[in-house]
């Protein structure tokens, strides 16, 4: 059989498998919204409930709130059922006030009080708290299950604390422990990040916010308490202060998405650790990392925002099914790829 015919047959099979998945269960939708090196990840459960993890930056004439609202409209969402603030750095919590003025938010979830006395977190936390306390407000603890119908959203890190018991099927000894240098203590908000593991049937998605290496290693060494995942949102925008080899390789993600900016994150060391992760099929990026060079960026078709201009706002969309199959789409070029067990 000729190569072109083989490719056509494989594409047809993947399409049929995705259609089969779609026919037997509603998909879980995940949108990685471009907020220029911050985070805003919108999850829509099969029941139609919504979870937003962070809301991007403050200011910029409401740019990030506007991008989140545009994606919410595409997803058919008129309210945010649960909004998680992973920590109080401005690229994560800044857009909450502007967003909450334009769409109802039913429940706010965070890690508790700010711990960082320098820069802007204290002021941003105070502003956020005024909004959060007008709605249902949850201070999450490791092990908590957050209220979202149709999926399980489990807190695995929050307020500097971590789960201490394995999350099935985790608990195995981690062969990659010892491959990272001993990291310094992080006394700021990053180490407080509220991290979650989202499960829909066999599909598993992990988002650890900006959790840094010392906490990562406590969670994954000597035993991997989380297990493996299908989808990994690269931690901390792809900075090297996070994304330890012992964590990333133990997670064994099938696909990773990096929410970097044109000049933020996308560190070559962290990028290489993720790219070399055993079993990784693809790495997708929200931006071309301008300072990393072509050798530390993926092929352009897997990058949502290829140019440096900050007014594109292209996103990456994931449709996941309970059998573990999922698809990823780049909104810039509408490239869609199936990932089938």
Image (cartoon, rainbow, N blue to C red):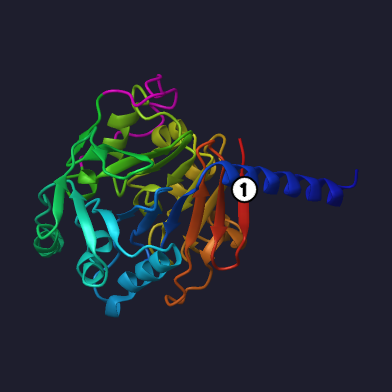
Determine which residue is flagged by label 1.
Answer: 338
Residue at image coords 21%, 52%: 87
Place of residue 89 in the rendered image (x, y in percent of width and height, measured from the top left): 22, 58
Secondary structure character of the magenta stretch overall? loop
Of 15 and 119, nearer the camera is 15
Query: Measured from the top left, where is residue 62 in percent x and y?
Result: 28, 76
Left or right side of 71 for 340: right
Q: Which is more toward the observer, 183 or 114?
A: 114
Q: Quadrant of the C terminus?
A: top right
* Residue 281 appears in view: no
Expressed as whole percent of the image width and height from the top left, the position of residue 22 reads: 58, 47
**Residue pictured at 41% horizontal, 30% vertical:** 179
Magenta stretch containing residue 166, yes or no? yes
- The residue stretch that appears in magenta: 165-185
The residue most toward the bottom is: 61
Q: Would you say residue 5 is visible in this rendering?
A: yes
Q: Position of residue 7 (x, y in %)?
A: 79, 49
- Between residue 72 and residue 336, name the one nearer to us: 72
Q: Is residue 138 above or below residue 162?
A: below
Q: Residues within 10 Å of mark 1 (few under 14, many from 20)?
A: some
The stretch drawn in magenta includes residue 143: no
- Against 270, residue 176 (above or below) is above
Residue nearest the observer in this picture, 155 or 104: 104
Q: Is residue 230 left or right of residue 120?
A: right
At numbered mark 1, what does the secondary structure look like: helix, strand or loop? strand
- The residue positioned 24% from the left and 70% from the top of the image is 58
Count how many numbered circles sit on residues in the image. Answer: 1
Quadrant of the rendering where the N terminus is positioned: top right
Q: Is residue 145 above or below residue 256?
A: above
Q: Is residue 283 left or right of residue 185?
A: right
Q: Is residue 259 left or right of residue 158?
A: right
């Amino acid at each position: 059989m000729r190569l072109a015919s083989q490719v056509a047959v494989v594409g047809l099979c993947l399409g049929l498998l995705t259609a089969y998945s779609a026919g037997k269960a509603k998909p879980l939708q995940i949108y990685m919204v471009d907020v220029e090196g911050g985070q805003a990840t919108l999850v829509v459960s099969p029941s139609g409930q919504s979870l937003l993890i962070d809301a991007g930056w403050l200011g910029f004439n409401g740019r990030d709130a506007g991008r989140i609202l545009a994606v919410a409209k595409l997803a058919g969402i008129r309210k945010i059922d649960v909004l998680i603030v992973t920590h109080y750095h401005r690229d994560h919590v800044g857009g909450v006030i502007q967003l909450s003025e334009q769409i109802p938010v039913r429940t706010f979830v965070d890690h508790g009080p700010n711990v960082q006395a320098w820069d802007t977190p204290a002021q941003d936390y105070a502003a956020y708290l005024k909004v959060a306390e007008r709605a249902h407000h949850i201070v999450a603890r490791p092990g908590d299950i957050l209220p979202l119908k149709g999926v399980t959203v489990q807190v695995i890190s929050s307020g500097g604390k971590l789960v201490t018991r394995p999350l099935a099927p985790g608990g195995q000894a981690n062969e990659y422990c010892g491959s990272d240098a001993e990291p310094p203590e992080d006394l700021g908000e990053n180490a407080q990040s509220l991290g979650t593991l989202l499960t829909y049937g066999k599909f598993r998605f992990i988002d650890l916010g900006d959790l840094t290496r010392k906490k990562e290693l406590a969670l994954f060494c000597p035993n991997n308490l989380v297990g493996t995942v299908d989808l990994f949102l690269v931690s901390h925008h792809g900075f090297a202060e996070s994304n330890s080899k012992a964590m990333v390789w133990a997670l064994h993600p099938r696909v990773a998405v990096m929410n970097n900016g044109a000049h933020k994150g996308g560190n070559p060391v962290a990028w290489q650790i993720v790219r070399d992760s055993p079993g990784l099929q693809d790495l997708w990026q929200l931006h071309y990392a301008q300072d990393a060079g072509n050798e530390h960026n993926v092929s352009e078709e897997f990058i949502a925002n290829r140019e440096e201009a900050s007014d594109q706002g292209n996103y990456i969309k994931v449709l996941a099914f309970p059998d573990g199959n999922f698809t990823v789409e780049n909104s810039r070029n509408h490239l869609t790829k199936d990932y089938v067990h």
